[in-house]
Image (cartoon, rainbow, N blue to C red):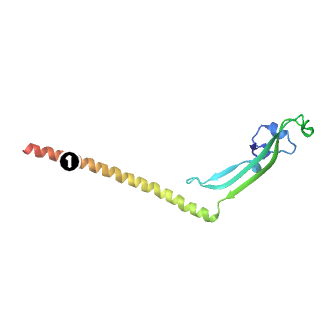
Amino acid sequence: MVSWPHFYLADPSYSQAIVGMRPDPDQHQFYMDMAEVTSVPLSVRGRMQLNMLMQTIPDIDLFKNIKRTVMPMMWFSQEADLTPNLASQIGVLVELVRWGRWVLLAGGGVGVLLVLVGVVLQVRGKLDHDDDRLLQ
Protein backbone atom coordinates (compact mmCIF):
# COMPACT_ATOMS: atom_id res chain seq x y z
CA MET A 1 0.00 0.00 0.00
CA VAL A 2 1.38 3.44 -0.92
CA SER A 3 0.64 6.81 0.68
CA TRP A 4 2.25 10.14 1.31
CA PRO A 5 4.77 10.07 4.19
CA HIS A 6 3.34 10.15 7.72
CA PHE A 7 -0.10 9.59 6.15
CA TYR A 8 -0.20 13.22 4.97
CA LEU A 9 -3.72 14.02 3.63
CA ALA A 10 -5.03 10.64 4.82
CA ASP A 11 -7.79 10.23 7.37
CA PRO A 12 -6.36 11.28 10.79
CA SER A 13 -7.10 7.82 12.18
CA TYR A 14 -4.12 6.42 10.23
CA SER A 15 -1.54 8.81 11.68
CA GLN A 16 -3.08 8.64 15.17
CA ALA A 17 -2.78 4.84 15.22
CA ILE A 18 1.04 5.01 14.99
CA VAL A 19 3.23 6.76 17.59
CA GLY A 20 5.42 9.48 16.07
CA MET A 21 3.38 10.21 12.95
CA ARG A 22 3.29 13.97 12.39
CA PRO A 23 2.18 14.86 8.84
CA ASP A 24 3.87 18.07 7.69
CA PRO A 25 3.10 19.54 4.23
CA ASP A 26 6.59 21.04 3.87
CA GLN A 27 8.26 17.67 4.40
CA HIS A 28 5.69 15.19 3.12
CA GLN A 29 3.80 16.58 0.14
CA PHE A 30 4.53 15.79 -3.51
CA TYR A 31 4.85 18.85 -5.71
CA MET A 32 6.11 19.97 -9.08
CA ASP A 33 6.84 23.52 -10.29
CA MET A 34 6.22 23.90 -14.03
CA ALA A 35 7.36 26.54 -16.53
CA GLU A 36 4.35 28.58 -17.58
CA VAL A 37 4.79 28.55 -21.36
CA THR A 38 6.47 25.17 -21.95
CA SER A 39 5.16 23.09 -19.01
CA VAL A 40 8.69 21.82 -18.40
CA PRO A 41 9.20 20.75 -14.75
CA LEU A 42 11.52 23.22 -13.00
CA SER A 43 11.51 21.62 -9.57
CA VAL A 44 10.13 18.26 -8.43
CA ARG A 45 9.74 16.87 -4.91
CA GLY A 46 8.36 13.34 -5.03
CA ARG A 47 7.68 11.74 -1.65
CA MET A 48 6.02 8.41 -1.01
CA GLN A 49 5.59 5.96 1.84
CA LEU A 50 5.29 2.17 1.60
CA ASN A 51 2.88 0.63 4.12
CA MET A 52 1.81 -2.83 5.15
CA LEU A 53 -1.56 -3.89 6.51
CA MET A 54 -1.11 -5.53 9.93
CA GLN A 55 -3.97 -7.62 11.33
CA THR A 56 -4.70 -10.38 13.80
CA ILE A 57 -3.66 -13.90 12.80
CA PRO A 58 -5.04 -16.21 15.51
CA ASP A 59 -2.78 -19.18 14.68
CA ILE A 60 0.48 -17.21 15.06
CA ASP A 61 1.37 -16.14 18.61
CA LEU A 62 3.24 -13.02 17.44
CA PHE A 63 0.13 -11.72 15.63
CA LYS A 64 -2.62 -12.80 18.06
CA ASN A 65 -3.00 -9.45 19.82
CA ILE A 66 -2.37 -7.08 16.91
CA LYS A 67 -5.23 -4.83 15.99
CA ARG A 68 -5.86 -4.07 12.32
CA THR A 69 -3.48 -1.21 11.43
CA VAL A 70 -1.74 0.20 8.37
CA MET A 71 1.94 0.12 9.38
CA PRO A 72 4.45 2.40 7.63
CA MET A 73 7.50 0.46 6.48
CA MET A 74 9.59 3.23 4.88
CA TRP A 75 9.26 6.53 3.12
CA PHE A 76 11.50 8.18 0.59
CA SER A 77 11.97 11.48 -1.15
CA GLN A 78 13.26 12.08 -4.66
CA GLU A 79 14.11 15.66 -5.55
CA ALA A 80 15.21 17.26 -8.80
CA ASP A 81 15.86 20.85 -9.84
CA LEU A 82 16.54 22.28 -13.27
CA THR A 83 20.24 23.00 -13.82
CA PRO A 84 21.32 26.50 -14.93
CA ASN A 85 22.38 25.10 -18.32
CA LEU A 86 18.96 23.55 -18.93
CA ALA A 87 17.25 26.69 -17.62
CA SER A 88 19.00 28.78 -20.30
CA GLN A 89 17.88 26.27 -22.95
CA ILE A 90 14.31 26.58 -21.64
CA GLY A 91 14.64 30.35 -22.11
CA VAL A 92 15.50 29.79 -25.77
CA LEU A 93 12.52 27.45 -26.10
CA VAL A 94 10.20 30.10 -24.60
CA GLU A 95 11.44 32.64 -27.17
CA LEU A 96 10.86 30.13 -29.99
CA VAL A 97 7.29 29.60 -28.78
CA ARG A 98 6.69 33.36 -28.73
CA TRP A 99 8.12 33.77 -32.24
CA GLY A 100 6.16 30.71 -33.37
CA ARG A 101 2.90 32.41 -32.45
CA TRP A 102 3.73 35.41 -34.63
CA VAL A 103 4.88 33.19 -37.51
CA LEU A 104 1.64 31.22 -37.25
CA LEU A 105 -0.45 34.41 -37.24
CA ALA A 106 1.50 35.85 -40.18
CA GLY A 107 1.17 32.59 -42.12
CA GLY A 108 -2.56 32.53 -41.42
CA GLY A 109 -2.87 36.14 -42.58
CA VAL A 110 -1.01 35.39 -45.81
CA GLY A 111 -3.24 32.35 -46.35
CA VAL A 112 -6.41 34.40 -45.91
CA LEU A 113 -5.04 37.06 -48.28
CA LEU A 114 -4.26 34.44 -50.95
CA VAL A 115 -7.76 32.98 -50.65
CA LEU A 116 -9.27 36.46 -51.09
CA VAL A 117 -7.07 37.11 -54.14
CA GLY A 118 -8.14 33.75 -55.60
CA VAL A 119 -11.82 34.55 -55.06
CA VAL A 120 -11.43 37.98 -56.67
CA LEU A 121 -9.61 36.51 -59.68
CA GLN A 122 -12.25 33.79 -60.03
CA VAL A 123 -15.12 36.30 -59.93
CA ARG A 124 -13.28 38.60 -62.35
CA GLY A 125 -12.65 35.70 -64.72
CA LYS A 126 -16.35 34.82 -64.78
CA LEU A 127 -17.29 38.44 -65.46
CA ASP A 128 -14.79 38.65 -68.33
CA HIS A 129 -16.10 35.35 -69.70
CA ASP A 130 -19.70 36.64 -69.56
CA ASP A 131 -18.63 39.78 -71.48
CA ASP A 132 -17.09 37.60 -74.20
CA ARG A 133 -20.38 35.72 -74.67
CA LEU A 134 -22.29 39.00 -75.04
CA LEU A 135 -19.95 40.17 -77.78
CA GLN A 136 -20.56 37.06 -79.92
**Residue type of the residue flagged with mark 1:** Arg
Front-most of residues 106 and 45: 45
Badge 1: few (under 14), some or many (20 or more) residues near its Cα, within 10 Å? few
The residue carrying mark 1 is 124
Residue 129: percent from left, percent from top:
15, 46
Residue 77: percent from left, percent from top:
75, 53
Which quarter of the rendered picture does the C terminus lie within? Answer: top left
Which quarter of the rendered picture does the N terminus lie within? Answer: top right
Q: Is residue 120 left or right of residue 57?
A: left
Q: Quadrant of residue 135?
A: top left
Front-most of residues 120 and 54: 54
Front-most of residues 95 and 76: 76
User: Could you tell me which secondary element the residue under label 1 belongs to?
Assistant: helix
Residue 130: percent from left, percent from top:
14, 43
Most extreme residue toward the front is 59
Most extreme residue toward the left is 136
Asked if residue 42 is positioned above or below residue 73 in the image, the reply reads below
Q: Is residue 3 left or right of residue 118?
A: right
Most extreme residue toward the right is 61
Residue 61: percent from left, percent from top:
93, 38
Q: Is residue 70 left or right of residue 85?
A: right
Q: Residue at x 31, y 49 (%)?
A: 115
Q: Residue at x 61, y 62 (%)?
A: 87
